[in-house]
Amino acid sequence: MASEKPTVVVTCTAPVNIAVVKYWGKRDEELILPINSSLSVTLHQDQLKTTTTAAISRDFTEDRIWLNGREEDVGQPRLQACLREIRRLARKRRSNGLEDPLPLSLSYKVHVASENNFPTAAGLASSAAGYACLAYALARVYGVDSDLSEVARRGSGSACRSLYGGFVEWQMGERPDGKDSVARQVAPESHWPELRVLILVVSAEKKPMGSTAGMQTSVETSALLKFRAEALVPARMAEMTRCIRERDFQAFGQLTMKDSNQFHATCLDTFPPISYLSDTSRRIIQLAHRFNAHHGRTKVAYTFDAGPNAVIFTLDDTVAEFVAAVRHSFPPESNGDKFLKGLPVEPVLLSDELKATLGMDPIPGGIRYIIATQVGPGPQVLDDPGAHLLGPDGLPKPAA
Ligand code: DP6
């Protein structure tokens, strides 16, 4: 049954982010407040993004949400927290006497449809882009223009860092109510144009333990995590900020690798231990160090989140050679799939010397594919009504 046109409909996109100083552990599970600050790089939406349409209408009888075309339970607590928070901010705005730019009612129910332009099955973190996009789209339909850190954070901690482009820190804050636990841009996406990002999608053997449960066990059992958060991360945040400001790739790369390794060390220190890295992940670590040793300096840096996929940072002049090294060590399986996606990369030949330094037995098919990308901007509003994922009846448009 076709109902009336939704009163307000907005479509937004939001990026994925990769932490170079990791968030791991909460001091407040309900408000999603972290035990340490973290810092991330926002990836370009040409390669990885979430698109979300939010619509409010007086015809809607309940809040509803569809993810990648499938209706999901709108009652899940984190989704409810985001909805509650945005409606609270909208109410606050009204009581401040600000004019509503759009005719809307806070009692209107919302319909949300969201999809990723990358396969969720690849094990790439999608919750950060997803909740940032939800926060951004809800803010637009409900006419909220204040800081959205809290709305996104209540969905998934790392999501608040996807609200900005470029290089972003999530300041842990001190207040028990979390009002000072917010994301801030450290430098815009234009700041370091040579920086490149390669996502090495590893063939996953099993589904790893989720971040939420994993970090909870770490907080309960790992003394190393407590030491890291209290004694090491504050200086690392300052040093990482300096590396970015000065575009010091050597130091940026080294600290990125050390912080990833330390995060995975805290996972092993968790009891029972958690291991996110696979044999292939460890071979990628070895490959990166041998590649750097061959060049006598840090030309590539790896980082791993709660799964076996590697994210490599490098500069534009090194991408082609490193991709050739990856192909050499992990010969693509001829399954017809494109091995290299995203930004184009020139094929180059490896020197015999570099091949000898890499010196490993090739692992065919160890890496399923590579996504080549770069630093990118924050969430965007799409003006084209054709981009809406919800039709005039407020239901998902059939897939094209
Ligand atoms: C390893 O943000 O997914 O990617 O707040 O429980 O939703 P919740 O966890 P989440 O954790 C991300 C952990 C990480 C490191 C990082 O992104 O900083």
Image (cartoon, rainbow, N blue to C red):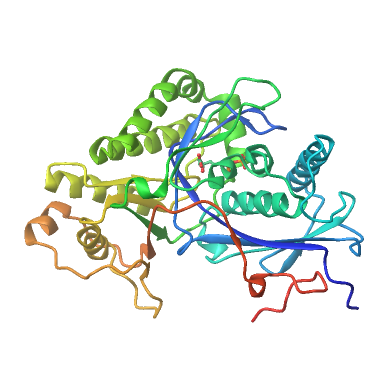
Residue 238 pos. (x, y %):
38, 26
Depth check, front residue: 171 or 319: 171
Determine the residue positioned at 33% across, 35% down: 245
Residue 111 pos. (x, y %):
79, 61
Q: Quadrant of ligand 1?
A: top right
Determine the residue positioned at 19% across, 60% down: 321
Determine the residue positioned at 36% across, 71% down: 339
Depth check, front residue: 257 or 217: 257
- Asked if residue 366 lies left or right of residue 289, the reply is right
Tell me the quarter of the picture where residue 360 sits.
bottom left
Tell me the quarter of the picture where residue 199 sits.
bottom left
Classify the position of the C terminus by image quarter: bottom right
Classify the position of the N terminus by image quarter: bottom right
- 398 is higher (above) or lower (below) than 49: below
Residue 195 pos. (x, y %):
31, 50
Depth check, front residue: 65 or 364: 65
**Total of numbered circles in the picture?**
0
Residue 148 pos. (x, y %):
65, 41
Looking at the image, can residue 275 be seen?
Answer: yes
Toward the left, the furthest residue is: 353
Determine the residue positioned at 65% across, 43% down: 152
- 85 is higher (above) or lower (below) than 5: above
Looking at the image, can residue 283 be seen?
Answer: no
Depth check, front residue: 231 or 358: 231
- Asked if residue 217 lies left or right of residue 230, the reply is right
